[in-house]
Image (cartoon, helix red, strand yellow):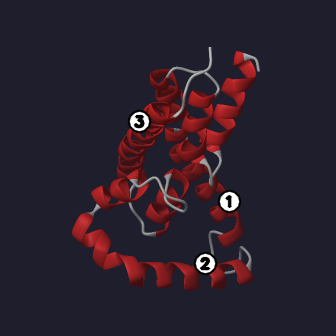
Amino acid sequence: MSLALILSITAFLSFMPISELRGAIPFAIASGIPWYWAYLFAVVLNALVAPVCWIFLATVHKFLYGESEDKGFRWYKSFFNHFVEKARSKLSEKLEKWGWLGIAIFVAIPLPITGAWTGTVGAWILGVSKKRTMAAVILGVIVAGAIVTAVVVFGIEAANLFIKKIQ
């Protein structure tokens, strides 16, 4: 596989909501990219999710919700208001306690459903400022990338103890 294809797939995985760093870093390392380049490349691309997601939410939401009572889509307003109130009632106490650092910790946990996409959407819904959201997501992505990279690198090293190399 060519380097351009490996980097393209890694970029795609870094930016996709389900895989993000959990898919991009292992793929890049398994494809022969040194761990430090895999980490740096995937983290930078995954950190770009926050501004892209924020812009998308701001524009699409503004269009669907409308700027006045008589504009926008009624079904969307109803769904959105219900969804936001439910999310805020569940998470507002935690957000007040942890603030933007709580979002960073949430993004830093490299498990399915946690990551830059979910962290950005959650922060946007809860009304966290754009600046704090970006800082939290970037910090979380850096930590998550380090965790995933360490697990992959040390996992490969541990596996090499038990696998006989054929020359």
- In this orientation, which residue lies closer to the viewer: 147 or 76? 147
Q: Which residue does the numbered mark 2 point to in the structure image?
A: 80
Amino acid type shown at disc 3: Phe
Find out whether the residues at labels 1 and 3 contact each other: C-beta distance under 8 Å: no
The crowd level at tag 1 (other Cα within 10 Å; few <14, some 14-19, many 20+) is few
Number of disc labels: 3
Placement of 87 over or under 132, stated as above or below: below
What is the CA distance from the residue labelled 2 to the residue labelled 3? Answer: 43 Å
Find out whether the residues at labels 2 and 1 contact each other: C-beta distance under 8 Å: no
Q: Which residue does the numbered mark 1 point to in the structure image?
A: 60
Amino acid type shown at disc 2: Phe
Check the image and name the residue furthest to the left: 97
Q: Who comes first in sequence, dot 2 or dot 3?
A: 2
Q: Position of residue 27 (x, y in %)?
A: 62, 35
Check the image and name the residue furthest to the top: 167
- The answer to which image quadrant residue 72 occupies is bottom right
Q: Which residue does the numbered mark 3 point to in the structure image?
A: 154
Q: Who comes first in sequence, dot 1 or dot 3?
A: 1
Q: Residue at x 77, y 21 (%)?
A: 1
Position of the C terminus by quadrant: top right
The crowd level at tag 2 (other Cα within 10 Å; few <14, some 14-19, many 20+) is some
Q: Who comes first in sequence, dot 2 or dot 1?
A: 1
Amino acid type shown at disc 1: Val
Q: Position of residue 19 (x, y in %)?
A: 62, 49
- In this orientation, which residue lies closer to the viewer: 46 or 80? 46
